[in-house]
Amino acid sequence: MAGVIVSLVAGTCFAGGCIPGAFDDGCGTGAKPALAASDEEGRPSRIAINHDDFDARYVGRLTDGRQFFLTTPFLPGKDGSDINQDFMAVYLFDRDGRFLEAKIDELNVPDSLDGAEVEQVYQARLKELGEVTFGRIEVEPFAVTRFGAEFGLIAQAPEDLDDIWWVTAEPGNYMAFAAPWDCGIYDT
């Protein structure tokens, strides 16, 4: 992901930053939540993920304060195949955003699941979590290895002088976060 990516995610993101006032959290105003931060070199210690109607529709908190991210990572098809290997992952974090555990299941289906089937699996996983409140989370990047692949919100250092730090949802690179880390929005 060399260079600057320009995108419009729900009309709020441009050139890796935020439109001032797009969210109620101070995003783009210079006001940073306490946990969305990076070290001096730019590697984030925490990233924010705002709840939305797309890839972040299942983020929030459990009744005990733990944070969760329920998502569907995938391994792209191999050897010219367009059939992905799909997974259902629940990532849990403590109330301060420290990674606790990953529960990852392979979705064993001959082809990709249709929307109704995916929603049923999501609802089953949500029920296992108990009562949840959907909303913004602030969590640390992490990586775990399962099924021979790295899963998680993985921090990626710049590859050259024109590049920037990224945190990507892997496998599948289906959500990409860049500074400012407190914005909570992502590129797809």
Image (spheres, rainbow, N blue to C red):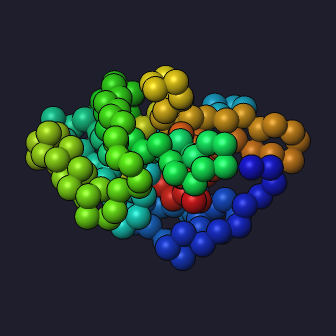
Please determine whether, in this image, residue 149 is positioned above or below residue 9: above
- Image coordinates of residue 43 in percent, x first then y, are 65, 34
Front residue of this view, candidates 84 and 18: 84
Front residue of this view, candidates 40 and 173: 173
Task: Name the residue furthest bottom.
Answer: 11
Residue drawn at (59%, 68%) of the image: 13
- Image coordinates of residue 171 in percent, x first then y, are 53, 40
Q: Report how many numbered discs are placed on residues in the image.
A: 0
Left or right, 164 with reference to 108: right
Task: Name the residue furthest right.
Answer: 161
Please determine whether, in this image, residue 157 is positioned above or below residue 25: above
- Image coordinates of residue 8 in percent, x first then y, are 60, 72
Residue drawn at (57%, 46%) of the image: 76
Please determine whether, in this image, residue 168 is positioned above or below residue 5: above
- The image quadrant of residue 7 is bottom right
Left or right, 77 with reference to 137: right
Please determine whether, in this image, residue 148 is positioned above or below residue 64: above
Left or right, 79 with reference to 101: right
Q: Quadrant of the C terminus?
A: bottom right
Front residue of this view, candidates 143 and 146: 146
- Image coordinates of residue 88 in percent, x first then y, are 34, 42
Residue drawn at (42%, 45%) of the image: 86
Asked whether residue 47 is in view, the answer is no
Asked whether residue 64 is in view, the answer is yes
Residue drawn at (15%, 35%) of the image: 64
